[in-house]
Image (tube, grey):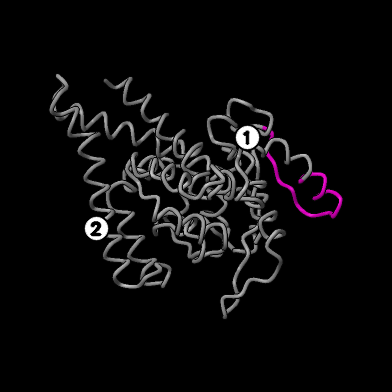
Amino acid sequence: MFACYFISAIGMAGVGMGVMHDAVHGSYSKHKSVNTWVGYTLDMVGASSMVWHLQHNVLHHSYTNIDEHDDDINAPFFLRFSPNGQQNNLHKYQHLYAWFFYSLSTLSWVTAKDFIRFTRYYNKGLVKGGEKAYKRGIVKLIFLKLSYFAVVLGLPIIFSPFSVGMIILGFIMMHFVTGLVITMVFQIAHIVEDVNFPKADCEGVVEGERILHQLATTCNFAPKSKMLFWFVGGLNFQVEHHLFPDICHVHYREIAPIVKATAEEFNVPYYSKPHFFMAVLDHFKMLYLLGNAPKLESIKA
Protein backbone atom coordinates (compact mmCIF):
# COMPACT_ATOMS: atom_id res chain seq x y z
CA MET A 1 0.00 0.00 0.00
CA PHE A 2 2.75 2.45 0.94
CA ALA A 3 4.63 1.57 -2.24
CA CYS A 4 1.52 2.38 -4.27
CA TYR A 5 1.07 5.69 -2.48
CA PHE A 6 4.74 6.52 -3.12
CA ILE A 7 4.30 5.77 -6.84
CA SER A 8 1.17 7.93 -6.79
CA ALA A 9 3.18 10.75 -5.21
CA ILE A 10 5.74 10.67 -8.02
CA GLY A 11 2.89 10.47 -10.54
CA MET A 12 1.10 13.46 -8.98
CA ALA A 13 4.28 15.53 -9.19
CA GLY A 14 4.82 14.45 -12.78
CA VAL A 15 1.26 15.26 -13.82
CA GLY A 16 1.50 18.68 -12.17
CA MET A 17 4.81 19.65 -13.73
CA GLY A 18 4.68 17.83 -17.06
CA VAL A 19 1.00 18.05 -18.05
CA MET A 20 -1.04 20.57 -16.06
CA HIS A 21 1.63 23.27 -16.07
CA ASP A 22 1.69 23.55 -19.87
CA ALA A 23 -2.10 23.29 -20.10
CA VAL A 24 -2.83 26.14 -17.69
CA HIS A 25 -0.28 28.27 -19.55
CA GLY A 26 -2.17 27.50 -22.75
CA SER A 27 0.84 25.79 -24.31
CA TYR A 28 -0.14 22.11 -24.11
CA SER A 29 -2.28 22.37 -27.25
CA LYS A 30 -3.14 24.90 -29.95
CA HIS A 31 -6.78 24.49 -28.93
CA LYS A 32 -8.03 26.44 -25.93
CA SER A 33 -10.64 23.81 -25.00
CA VAL A 34 -7.98 21.08 -24.89
CA ASN A 35 -5.83 23.20 -22.59
CA THR A 36 -8.82 23.85 -20.33
CA TRP A 37 -9.71 20.19 -19.96
CA VAL A 38 -6.11 19.01 -19.58
CA GLY A 39 -5.65 21.73 -16.96
CA TYR A 40 -8.25 19.93 -14.85
CA THR A 41 -5.64 17.23 -14.20
CA LEU A 42 -4.54 19.52 -11.36
CA ASP A 43 -8.03 19.33 -9.87
CA MET A 44 -7.88 15.55 -10.24
CA VAL A 45 -4.88 15.49 -7.88
CA GLY A 46 -6.56 17.76 -5.33
CA ALA A 47 -5.49 21.33 -6.17
CA SER A 48 -7.33 23.99 -8.17
CA SER A 49 -6.34 24.92 -11.72
CA MET A 50 -8.48 28.05 -11.37
CA VAL A 51 -6.50 29.31 -8.36
CA TRP A 52 -3.18 28.12 -9.81
CA HIS A 53 -3.76 30.27 -12.90
CA LEU A 54 -4.07 33.39 -10.75
CA GLN A 55 -1.22 32.51 -8.40
CA HIS A 56 1.23 31.28 -11.03
CA ASN A 57 0.39 32.79 -14.41
CA VAL A 58 -0.83 36.17 -13.22
CA LEU A 59 1.25 36.90 -10.09
CA HIS A 60 4.41 34.78 -10.24
CA HIS A 61 5.14 35.34 -13.94
CA SER A 62 4.25 39.03 -13.82
CA TYR A 63 6.12 39.89 -10.60
CA THR A 64 8.87 37.27 -10.34
CA ASN A 65 10.84 37.60 -7.07
CA ILE A 66 9.15 40.88 -6.14
CA ASP A 67 8.25 40.80 -2.45
CA GLU A 68 4.51 41.13 -1.64
CA HIS A 69 3.59 40.69 -5.31
CA ASP A 70 5.02 37.31 -6.34
CA ASP A 71 2.88 34.85 -4.39
CA ASP A 72 5.54 32.15 -4.70
CA ILE A 73 7.77 34.05 -2.26
CA ASN A 74 4.99 35.36 -0.01
CA ALA A 75 5.68 33.02 2.89
CA PRO A 76 4.32 32.60 6.44
CA PHE A 77 6.18 34.40 9.24
CA PHE A 78 8.55 31.49 9.90
CA LEU A 79 9.96 31.51 6.34
CA ARG A 80 11.78 34.29 4.51
CA PHE A 81 12.27 33.95 0.77
CA SER A 82 13.31 37.49 -0.14
CA PRO A 83 15.95 39.88 1.23
CA ASN A 84 13.25 42.55 1.00
CA GLY A 85 10.96 40.67 3.43
CA GLN A 86 10.75 41.10 7.18
CA GLN A 87 13.33 39.14 9.18
CA ASN A 88 12.92 37.54 12.61
CA ASN A 89 14.92 35.22 14.87
CA LEU A 90 13.20 32.07 13.60
CA HIS A 91 14.69 32.61 10.16
CA LYS A 92 18.14 31.75 11.49
CA TYR A 93 17.14 28.10 11.35
CA GLN A 94 14.94 28.08 8.25
CA HIS A 95 17.61 26.35 6.18
CA LEU A 96 17.07 23.36 8.48
CA TYR A 97 13.30 23.26 8.92
CA ALA A 98 12.05 24.70 5.60
CA TRP A 99 12.20 21.24 3.99
CA PHE A 100 9.60 19.89 6.41
CA PHE A 101 7.20 22.67 5.47
CA TYR A 102 7.92 22.08 1.78
CA SER A 103 6.64 18.55 2.38
CA LEU A 104 3.41 19.95 3.82
CA SER A 105 2.78 22.27 0.89
CA THR A 106 0.47 20.08 -1.22
CA LEU A 107 -1.36 18.77 1.86
CA SER A 108 -2.16 22.38 2.69
CA TRP A 109 -2.93 23.00 -0.97
CA VAL A 110 -5.64 20.33 -1.26
CA THR A 111 -7.32 21.39 1.99
CA ALA A 112 -7.29 25.08 2.94
CA LYS A 113 -4.79 27.01 0.81
CA ASP A 114 -6.88 27.20 -2.36
CA PHE A 115 -9.80 28.74 -0.46
CA ILE A 116 -7.53 31.23 1.32
CA ARG A 117 -5.80 32.29 -1.86
CA PHE A 118 -8.94 32.51 -3.95
CA THR A 119 -10.53 34.79 -1.35
CA ARG A 120 -7.41 36.95 -1.24
CA TYR A 121 -7.29 37.21 -5.02
CA TYR A 122 -10.95 38.20 -5.06
CA ASN A 123 -10.23 40.97 -2.55
CA LYS A 124 -7.35 42.11 -4.77
CA GLY A 125 -9.73 42.36 -7.73
CA LEU A 126 -8.14 39.50 -9.67
CA VAL A 127 -11.32 37.42 -9.98
CA LYS A 128 -13.17 38.52 -13.10
CA GLY A 129 -16.93 38.69 -12.75
CA GLY A 130 -17.15 40.14 -9.27
CA GLU A 131 -19.02 38.61 -6.36
CA LYS A 132 -21.07 36.17 -8.47
CA ALA A 133 -17.91 34.73 -10.01
CA TYR A 134 -16.34 34.47 -6.56
CA LYS A 135 -19.33 32.56 -5.16
CA ARG A 136 -19.38 30.24 -8.18
CA GLY A 137 -15.67 29.68 -7.71
CA ILE A 138 -16.11 28.73 -4.06
CA VAL A 139 -18.87 26.24 -4.96
CA LYS A 140 -16.64 24.82 -7.69
CA LEU A 141 -13.74 24.47 -5.24
CA ILE A 142 -15.93 22.65 -2.70
CA PHE A 143 -17.29 20.26 -5.33
CA LEU A 144 -13.88 19.40 -6.78
CA LYS A 145 -12.27 18.98 -3.35
CA LEU A 146 -15.04 16.65 -2.18
CA SER A 147 -14.73 14.67 -5.42
CA TYR A 148 -10.98 14.33 -4.92
CA PHE A 149 -11.25 13.12 -1.32
CA ALA A 150 -14.10 10.77 -2.23
CA VAL A 151 -11.88 9.03 -4.78
CA VAL A 152 -8.48 9.17 -3.08
CA LEU A 153 -9.63 8.44 0.47
CA GLY A 154 -13.22 7.22 0.19
CA LEU A 155 -12.75 4.41 -2.31
CA PRO A 156 -9.72 2.86 -0.54
CA ILE A 157 -11.55 3.02 2.79
CA ILE A 158 -14.59 1.27 1.30
CA PHE A 159 -12.93 -1.34 -0.90
CA SER A 160 -9.42 -2.02 0.39
CA PRO A 161 -8.56 -4.40 3.24
CA PHE A 162 -6.47 -1.75 5.01
CA SER A 163 -7.58 0.17 8.07
CA VAL A 164 -8.72 3.80 7.91
CA GLY A 165 -5.65 4.85 9.89
CA MET A 166 -3.27 3.10 7.49
CA ILE A 167 -4.95 4.67 4.46
CA ILE A 168 -4.81 8.16 5.99
CA LEU A 169 -1.15 7.61 6.87
CA GLY A 170 -0.41 6.53 3.30
CA PHE A 171 -2.30 9.55 1.97
CA ILE A 172 -0.23 11.90 4.16
CA MET A 173 3.01 10.20 3.10
CA MET A 174 1.99 10.60 -0.55
CA HIS A 175 1.57 14.35 -0.09
CA PHE A 176 4.81 14.63 1.87
CA VAL A 177 6.69 13.22 -1.13
CA THR A 178 4.77 15.23 -3.73
CA GLY A 179 5.07 18.47 -1.77
CA LEU A 180 8.82 18.13 -1.31
CA VAL A 181 9.46 17.28 -4.97
CA ILE A 182 7.31 20.05 -6.45
CA THR A 183 8.41 22.76 -4.04
CA MET A 184 12.10 21.99 -4.52
CA VAL A 185 11.79 22.19 -8.31
CA PHE A 186 10.17 25.62 -8.17
CA GLN A 187 12.30 27.01 -5.33
CA ILE A 188 15.69 26.17 -6.81
CA ALA A 189 14.80 28.17 -9.92
CA HIS A 190 14.27 31.47 -8.12
CA ILE A 191 15.60 31.42 -4.55
CA VAL A 192 19.30 30.95 -5.12
CA GLU A 193 22.35 33.15 -4.62
CA ASP A 194 22.81 34.29 -8.22
CA VAL A 195 19.41 35.76 -8.93
CA ASN A 196 18.07 39.22 -8.13
CA PHE A 197 15.15 40.30 -5.96
CA PRO A 198 13.92 43.58 -7.46
CA LYS A 199 12.14 46.00 -5.16
CA ALA A 200 9.07 48.02 -6.04
CA ASP A 201 9.05 51.72 -5.19
CA CYS A 202 6.43 53.42 -3.01
CA GLU A 203 4.04 53.51 -5.97
CA GLY A 204 4.48 49.81 -6.71
CA VAL A 205 6.61 50.38 -9.80
CA VAL A 206 9.64 48.22 -10.63
CA GLU A 207 12.16 49.68 -13.03
CA GLY A 208 13.41 47.64 -15.96
CA GLU A 209 12.23 45.64 -18.96
CA ARG A 210 10.25 42.40 -18.68
CA ILE A 211 12.70 40.11 -20.48
CA LEU A 212 15.69 41.45 -18.55
CA HIS A 213 13.71 41.09 -15.33
CA GLN A 214 13.02 37.41 -16.04
CA LEU A 215 16.66 36.75 -16.91
CA ALA A 216 17.83 38.40 -13.69
CA THR A 217 15.41 36.53 -11.42
CA THR A 218 15.48 33.00 -12.85
CA CYS A 219 17.97 30.14 -12.93
CA ASN A 220 18.11 26.89 -14.91
CA PHE A 221 19.41 23.64 -13.46
CA ALA A 222 20.68 20.32 -14.85
CA PRO A 223 20.12 21.32 -18.51
CA LYS A 224 21.83 18.16 -19.81
CA SER A 225 19.64 15.70 -17.89
CA LYS A 226 17.09 14.19 -20.28
CA MET A 227 15.47 12.16 -17.53
CA LEU A 228 14.94 15.19 -15.30
CA PHE A 229 13.71 17.20 -18.26
CA TRP A 230 11.05 14.56 -18.92
CA PHE A 231 9.99 14.22 -15.28
CA VAL A 232 9.73 17.93 -14.41
CA GLY A 233 8.12 18.92 -17.69
CA GLY A 234 11.05 21.04 -18.82
CA LEU A 235 11.03 23.15 -15.66
CA ASN A 236 14.78 22.74 -15.35
CA PHE A 237 14.78 25.28 -18.22
CA GLN A 238 13.07 27.93 -16.13
CA VAL A 239 14.73 30.80 -18.00
CA GLU A 240 13.21 29.71 -21.31
CA HIS A 241 9.88 29.05 -19.62
CA HIS A 242 9.73 32.52 -18.08
CA LEU A 243 10.68 34.17 -21.34
CA PHE A 244 8.26 32.12 -23.43
CA PRO A 245 5.52 30.66 -21.17
CA ASP A 246 3.24 30.14 -24.18
CA ILE A 247 5.69 27.69 -25.80
CA CYS A 248 5.27 24.00 -24.91
CA HIS A 249 8.10 22.68 -22.73
CA VAL A 250 9.11 20.02 -25.27
CA HIS A 251 10.86 22.79 -27.24
CA TYR A 252 12.91 24.28 -24.38
CA ARG A 253 16.00 22.14 -25.00
CA GLU A 254 16.16 23.36 -28.61
CA ILE A 255 15.65 27.06 -27.90
CA ALA A 256 17.92 27.20 -24.82
CA PRO A 257 21.21 27.51 -26.80
CA ILE A 258 19.68 30.39 -28.80
CA VAL A 259 18.59 32.18 -25.62
CA LYS A 260 21.97 31.64 -23.97
CA ALA A 261 23.90 32.87 -27.01
CA THR A 262 21.69 35.96 -27.28
CA ALA A 263 22.15 36.73 -23.58
CA GLU A 264 25.93 36.47 -23.98
CA GLU A 265 25.83 38.65 -27.09
CA PHE A 266 24.06 41.46 -25.22
CA ASN A 267 25.95 40.88 -21.95
CA VAL A 268 22.84 40.15 -19.87
CA PRO A 269 22.46 37.43 -17.20
CA TYR A 270 21.80 33.81 -18.06
CA TYR A 271 21.97 31.76 -14.86
CA SER A 272 22.24 27.98 -14.91
CA LYS A 273 23.43 25.29 -12.50
CA PRO A 274 24.96 22.20 -14.15
CA HIS A 275 23.44 19.70 -11.69
CA PHE A 276 20.20 19.33 -9.76
CA PHE A 277 21.83 18.75 -6.38
CA MET A 278 24.13 21.73 -6.93
CA ALA A 279 21.00 23.86 -7.32
CA VAL A 280 19.48 22.32 -4.16
CA LEU A 281 22.67 23.11 -2.24
CA ASP A 282 22.60 26.68 -3.55
CA HIS A 283 19.00 27.01 -2.36
CA PHE A 284 20.04 25.68 1.06
CA LYS A 285 22.77 28.34 1.23
CA MET A 286 20.35 31.05 0.18
CA LEU A 287 17.88 30.06 2.90
CA TYR A 288 20.74 30.36 5.38
CA LEU A 289 21.75 33.78 4.07
CA LEU A 290 18.18 35.05 4.13
CA GLY A 291 17.87 33.95 7.74
CA ASN A 292 21.26 35.04 9.04
CA ALA A 293 22.45 38.03 7.02
CA PRO A 294 22.72 41.02 9.39
CA LYS A 295 21.75 43.51 6.69
CA LEU A 296 19.68 43.33 3.53
CA GLU A 297 22.64 44.77 1.61
CA SER A 298 24.65 41.62 2.38
CA ILE A 299 22.50 39.71 -0.10
CA LYS A 300 22.21 40.58 -3.76
CA ALA A 301 19.06 42.63 -4.11
Q: Check residue 265 for magenta coloring.
A: yes
Numbered mark located on residue 139 in the image:
2
Query: Label 1 is placed on what type of residue?
Result: Met
| Residue 241 appears in the picture as rendered | yes
Q: Which amino acid type corresponds to the residue marked 2 in the rendered image?
A: Val
Q: Nearer the viewer, mark 2 or mark 1?
A: 2
- Give x and y (percent) for residue 190: 59, 50
Q: Residues within 10 Å of mark 2 (few under 14, many from 20)?
A: few
* SS of the residue under disc 2: helix
Which residue shows up at 49% across the image and 66% down it?
68
Q: Which residue is mark 1?
A: 278
Which of the 4 quarters of the picture holds residue 131?
A: bottom left
Looking at the image, residue 196 sits to the left or right of residue 132; the answer is: right
Name the residue located 26 percent from the left edge and 65 percent from the top edge: 135
Report the residue at 74% width, 48% height from top: 270
Quadrant in which the C terminus is drawn: bottom right
Q: Is residue 29 left or right of residue 159?
A: right
Magenta stretch, residue numbers: 259-274
Please determine whether, in this image, residue 245 is positioned above or below residue 185. Answer: below
- Marks 2 and 1 sit apart, C-alpha to C-alpha, by 43 Å
Residue 132 is situated, as x and y percent measured from the top left of the image, at 29, 70
Among the 4 quarters of the image, the one containing residue 90: bottom left
Pointers 2 and 1 in contact (C-beta within 8 Å) = no
Q: Nearer the viewer, residue 277 or 163?
A: 163
Please tell me which of labels 2 and 1 falls first in the chain. Answer: 2
